[in-house]
Amino acid sequence: MISIALKTLRHRRAGFTGAFVALLFAAALVTACGMLLETGLRGSVAPERYAGTPVIVAGDQFVRETKASGKSKAKPLSERRWIPASIAEEVRRIPGVTKVVTEVTFPFAGFTAHGWESAQLTPFTLAGGRAPEAADEVVVDARNAATKIPGYRVVGVTAQALPSQDTIFFATSEARRLAGRAGLVTAIGVFPEVDVTVKGALAYTGDERGALEFLDAESARVKLISLGGALGGTSLLVAILVVVGTFALSIQQRQREIAMLRAVAATPKQIRKLIGGEALLVSVAAGLLGSAAGMLLGFWLQARFVALGAMPANLPLVVSPFPALAAVLATLAAAWTAGRVSARRIARIRPVEALGEAALPGGRLPWARLIAGVLAVALGVVLTAVLSSLSTEAASSPVTMLTALVWTIAVALLGPMIARVAAALPPAPGAGGHLASKNLRAGTKRLASVITPLTLMTAMTCTILFVQATMGHAAQNEVDAGVKADYVLGPGAAAATAREVPGVRAATEVLRTSARIGLDKFSVQAVTPEGLDQTMDLDVTAGSLAGFGTTSAALSRTAAERLNAGVGDRIELTLGDGTPAVVKVAAVYSRGLGFGDLTLPHKLVAAHVDDPRGTVLVSGGDRTALERALPAVTVRTQAEAAETGTSDPAVNYVAMGLIIAFCAIAVVNTLAMSTSARSRELALLRLVGATRRQILRMLRTETLIATAAAVAIGTGISLVTVTASSVGMTGSATPYLPPLTYLGVIAAAAALALLATAIPARLALRTHPAEALGARE
């Protein structure tokens, strides 16, 4: 049957092009997602600052928890863990150690700052000048030789510059003063390489030094694992749905041919082998080409993520054969399954029935498909209910996309029933509209095959866009309602100075970080409590912030529900740098989306973050006076500050945009296949007197009816999904749907559908009707 499959492919190139295109893009998408996932699992960063040091002793950058079963789990810290400087003395006593170098690292005016003592770790050498000695002296790297440092004198320039960081060195004593961590250091360099075991610290060698040096690389790896896994899983499900739909349309167009094979004694087993062989041949070619294209797509994604700041440039993409192999196997399995499932019914029924069904397709939906559709609807209902109970983004995001997909699968399974409803609409005026109405009623299977990818595209696009918009809108509404301050001062602002400006009623320092309770991560804002009621309104629903002290905490309502905690309860948490703390819940508030899961005292948190420079909210005063009192600080109104967002939504749009693009390709693919297969029908219409204009109008009308039905169904799926997500994440059953964005989605779907219909139709109409009728199928 493989030889017959080869001949079939040669003589039905147009019919198999659609399946090839769908499989190729599926393989590319799966390969790119696999590369992201593998980079998250196996990626590493080469050290730069620690490149010349064989062993680095530093703190454990993970929170660890051992379960009762003995299994240990670890989650990364968001800030750098510092260790006692006294550990250096213990290390010096280890046999074989000849030199020990301590280091402090902290941010300073856009530089990564250190004491000059740690220059030996790279090593840095002087190209000119001398080492810093006085408190107002600094050495800068070669890239910043001409840079002026306010308040300091540049007395030396190094011969080196690190690829991904600007470096500045202070005198050792001044560096430790600026770091503000008395008796602590960030790392200890050990020469030569020996086994180092000390209490309260770990020894890092090889690429472990890079992970220690670049903490953002570790968080990026975790994000890539989550993103690659979720995107890969969603891509695979979308790919299967698209490929099954494409093969179903292809088999539907070949019903008469398969029925003839049955009539000349081909057995059901031989038919299944034929279809399976065709699927395997197409999928092998598409899988190999698609996986190669997927590698290029993976590098493009990496470049976009680096540009958006979601991935460090020095975290290289892991390139191995495993994602490509997985993509080829996935496309093989998807194609073979799709082909066998699509041909199942016509291969099983009797030859005479097969010929009859090919001539006049039956209207009844097979019982197996009907039952599967009902089960998909039931699963969609269950997932919608589950989604409405999820209050964290990590849990909600994958379920959101799965919910939309399951509803779309239900539409695909019950498509012929939906198509019959759409075909029953009153015909449009004119001959073209009359022809379109008759064609739709006679070809509900073809209409269903067109509605499915259009529904998928609309549902996925609207869900991706509107979930992000709903979350962002809800968070911004909470910020707008909760920030009572008139101005927001940028990083480095001195709150004490701002308070002395005439007219200023209150100035609140705000730091953003995260903390872990157990292994669960919670977003944190740290605030100075003095005058907090004049700059911020968290909408407290229980307790009070009146007596907010250094060991107090306020929880968002969502965090309180997750922790099953209330006012007066004590909570053990781990701050960003791994320091344990116990706080007492003073209040519960409702505006957690805008202000974070936990609100902690500024004094408790400031000493445990890498960069203690946060923003300052100021109530009262005059902008000009604030700018004059704080000349090096950015002063913005609350409205101006609200325009500055994070890159996370953009990262999600880039990632999920690939799935939208794949859905768009599926729409074009399906409509082009459907229209191209009707060349004989169009030729017959022309022979009986229909003009080209009437035929094109007929096709446009059919496409617009299919698009309208798909947009209505896809919008409904999206509304159900986004509403459930909104209930879980914001507590509101009213999602935010930007009208212009929605109109853009509808316009794009309609334009894409009309274009995919018009081009193959015009090509088909160029052929003389007699030639088209006489051409081989």
Image: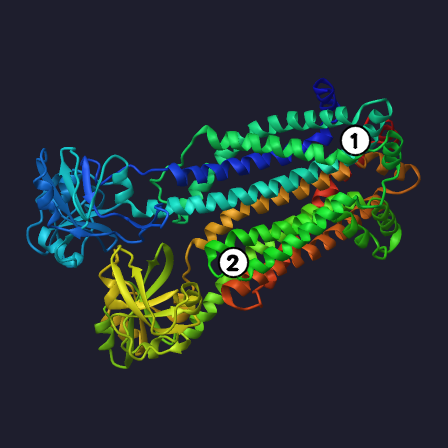
Would you name the residue on which mark 2 appears?
Answer: 468
The amino acid type, in three-letter code, at marker 2 is Gln
Which residue of the protein is positioned furthest toward the top in this rendering?
3
Residue in the image at 60% along x and 61% along y = 740
In the picture shown, does residue 159 fall above or below 285?
A: below
In this rendered view, identify the residue nearer to me: 508 or 643: 508
Position above or below: 33 against 264: below
Query: What is the secondary structure assignment of the residue under circle 2?
Result: helix
Q: Which residue appears farthest toward the front when viewing the image?
A: 69
Q: Quadrant of residue 192?
A: top left
Q: Position of residue 605 (x, y in %)?
A: 26, 63
Q: Nearer the viewer, residue 570 or 703?
A: 570
Task: Report the quarter where the N terminus lies.
Answer: top right
Rendered position, 393 above or below 529: above
Residue at position x 59%, y 33% in the image: 331
Q: Residues within 10 Å of mark 1 (few under 14, many from 20)?
A: many
Question: What residue lies at 72% left-to-right and 22% top-to-bottom?
Answer: 5
**Colour mode?**
rainbow
Q: Which mark is residue 347?
A: 1
For the residue labelled by badge 1, is the local secondary structure a helix, a strand or a loop? helix
Q: Tell me if 438 is positioned left or right of 562 in this view.
A: right
Q: Work out which quarter of the rendered image holds the C terminus and state it.
A: top right
Query: Are dots 1 and 2 in contact, CB under 8 Å?
Result: no
Q: Which disc number belongs to residue 495?
A: none
The image shows residue 4 at horizontal and vertical percentages of 74, 20
Q: Position of residue 750 (x, y in %)?
A: 69, 51
Query: Which numbered disc, 1 or 2, marks the residue closer to the eye?
Result: 1
Depth check, front residue: 101 or 581: 581
| Residue 82 or residue 470, whichever sits in front | 82
Disc 1 marks which amino acid?
A: Ala
Task: Note whether residue 764 is visible.
Answer: yes
